[in-house]
Amino acid sequence: MNQIQRQTTNVLMAGVGGQGVLLASEALALAALADGMEAKQSEVHGVAQRGGSVVSHVRFGQRVYSPLIRCGEADVLYAAERLEALRYAHYLRPRGRIVLNDHVLKPIQLPDEPEQPYPEAIPEFLRGKGYEVDLIPALEIALELGEKRCANVVLLGALSTRLDLSDQAWRSGLEKRVPERILTLNLEAFARGRGLVSASAG
């Protein structure tokens, strides 16, 4: 599955406030702990409000000393929105991978500011820079499941195929982070995202 198997794995997780980036990053860190690894997760950087950019650093392995990922050292970028992938791609190592939600959220602009066009062809641009890009219709799948707010977990399922963590560890991470009343829905969302990448790889 083109999984990452290195001593320390660095995952940068970015999105817009309200997209559930923090929940996804906490579930990842908990999954790594469940597999017996050390895991460190940074505080969220950026504006943790709807409309603002949010980013979280997650590092896990046999021994992890710092929670922060330096520019050029991320193995995978989890991007919940197209522009956020463009904004944080410089954190990736050469030929790093982006697991990208195929979704556009135009930034909020002040009334007296001239309107800025949203960049087009972002996945193609990033591939042209040498990055591997998994383009995931996470919101579309979440809507099929009847809850758009689980798009972050659909994307997390896709991310899981690119990391060396066990199925049971992922389930444990979700069980510890997701409220019981919506756990079944989120497990299905995770499975849908995971299956989507597995099917395309096969």
Image (tube, helix red, strand yellow):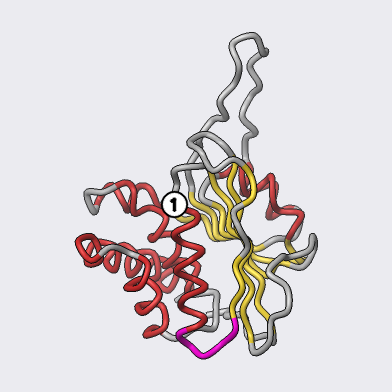
Q: Residue at x 42, y 51 (%)?
A: 137
Q: Residue at x 40, y 70 (%)?
A: 194
What x and y, as percent, mark residue 42? 63, 63
- In the orientation shown, which residue stands out farthest toward the top? 112
Q: Residue 100 sits in which quadrant?
A: bottom right
Q: How many marks?
A: 1
Q: Is residue 99 visible?
A: yes
Q: Residue at x 56, y 25 (%)?
A: 108
| Residue 17 highlighted magenta (yes or no) | no
Q: Nearer the viewer, residue 19 or 139?
A: 19
Q: Quadrant of the C terminus?
A: bottom left
Q: Nearer the viewer, residue 63 or 153?
A: 63
Instruction: Identify the secondary structure beneath mark 1.
Output: loop
Label 1 Cα crowd, 10 Å radius (few <14 / some 14-19 / many 20+): some
Q: Nearer the viewer, residue 104 or 68?
A: 68
User: Which residue in the structure is indicated by mark 1?
Assistant: 20
Q: Is residue 133 visible?
A: no
Q: Is residue 114 left or right of residue 37?
A: right
For residue 43, above or below residue 32? above
Q: Residue 12 sits in which quadrant?
A: bottom right
Q: Nearer the viewer, residue 86 or 15?
A: 15
For residue 202, above or below residue 84? below
Q: What residue span does the magenta drawing correspond to?
A: 34-38
Amino acid at the residue labelled 1: Gly
What x and y, as percent, mark residue 91? 74, 58
The chief SS type of the magenta part is: loop
Q: Is residue 173 left or right of residue 181?
A: right
Q: Residue 70 sits in which quadrant?
A: bottom right
What x and y, as percent, mark residue 24? 46, 61
Q: Is residue 127 left or right of residue 22?
A: right
